[in-house]
Amino acid sequence: MPPPRIHPTALVSEKANIEDGVQVWLHCQVREDVRIGSGSILGKNVYVDAGVQIGRNVKIQNNVSVFHGVTLEDGVFVGPHVCFTNDKEPRAVNPDLSLKGADDWIVSPTLVKTGAAIGANSTILCGITLGEWSMIGAGSVVTKDVPAHALVAGCPARVLGWVCACGKRVALSGERARCVCGRELEAAGDGSVGMRAVPLC
């Protein structure tokens, strides 16, 4: 895999860990203690805050803000203009009108699990998990955990159905579903909410 390709206009901290095959395009900013896994792509004007963890083969489109406390696992897609938040009680100042500092608020971590896709212009509130292979419809405001393989949309986002890892919507028959691509899903039987892929024999 080739070494990272970083556009001359991008600002990448020397304390960031950028693996081979990563592409960082125009006007991006990557802060200290960020890790970006091999093969990932950051489109134009992406901001990656300090300490963010990004897995392998992640695609982040133009004008996305990924703030401190966010983890993107392998294969995640983040559409243009998506914004992640990290403070459940945001204020610029304390009650005495003194400017808030780093010790005056608590980061609420957000986890986006393997293969999940987030549509353009969505807002992801902090302190939640987006499940494996879930799909967030464009323009959604996501306020709570999203199950694995769930299709959600709206403000606030609600579960509308289920999707395969290939991205196609699947129809349930009882607690199972079969995609046109041949993959099968079944209701998670381990006490969690959502669907999971049926192991291939």
Image (cartoon, grey):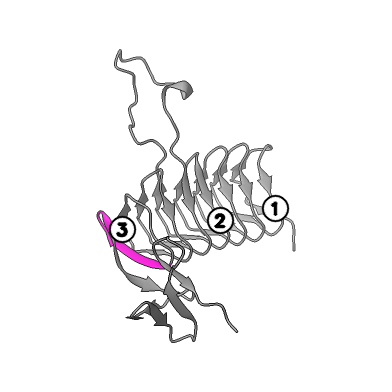
* Disc 3 target residue: 139
Name which residue type carries label 2: Glu
Is 164 or 47 nearer to us in this picture? 164
Tell me how many marks there are.
3
| Residue 95: image location, x then y, percent | 29, 17
Q: Secondary structure at mark 1?
A: loop
Q: CA distance from mark 2 to mark 3?
A: 22 Å
Q: In the image, what residue occupies the spot 59% across and 46% down? A: 9
Name which residue type carries label 3: Gly
Q: Earlier in the sequence, mark 2 or mark 3?
A: 2
Is 89 or 13 nearer to us in this picture? 89
Q: CA distance from mark 3 to mark 1?
A: 31 Å
* Disc 2 target residue: 73
Name which residue type carries label 1: Glu
Q: Is residue 27 left or right of residue 138?
A: right
Q: Earlier in the sequence, mark 3 or mark 1?
A: 1
Q: Earlier in the sequence, mark 2 or mark 1?
A: 1
* Disc 1 target residue: 19
Q: Nearer the viewer, mark 2 or mark 3?
A: 2
Looking at the rendered image, the quarter that the N terminus falls into is bottom right
Image marks 2 and 3: residues in contact by CB distance under 8 Å: no
Circle 1: is it few (<14), some (14-19), or many (20+) Cα within 10 Å? some
Is 72 or 201 nearer to us in this picture? 201
Q: Which residues are magenta?
A: 149-157
Q: In the image, what residue occupies the spot 33% across and 80% down? A: 174
Circle 3: is it few (<14), some (14-19), or many (20+) Cα within 10 Å? some
Q: Main secondary structure of the magenta part?
A: strand
Q: Using the rendered view, name the quadrant where residue 186 is placed.
A: bottom left
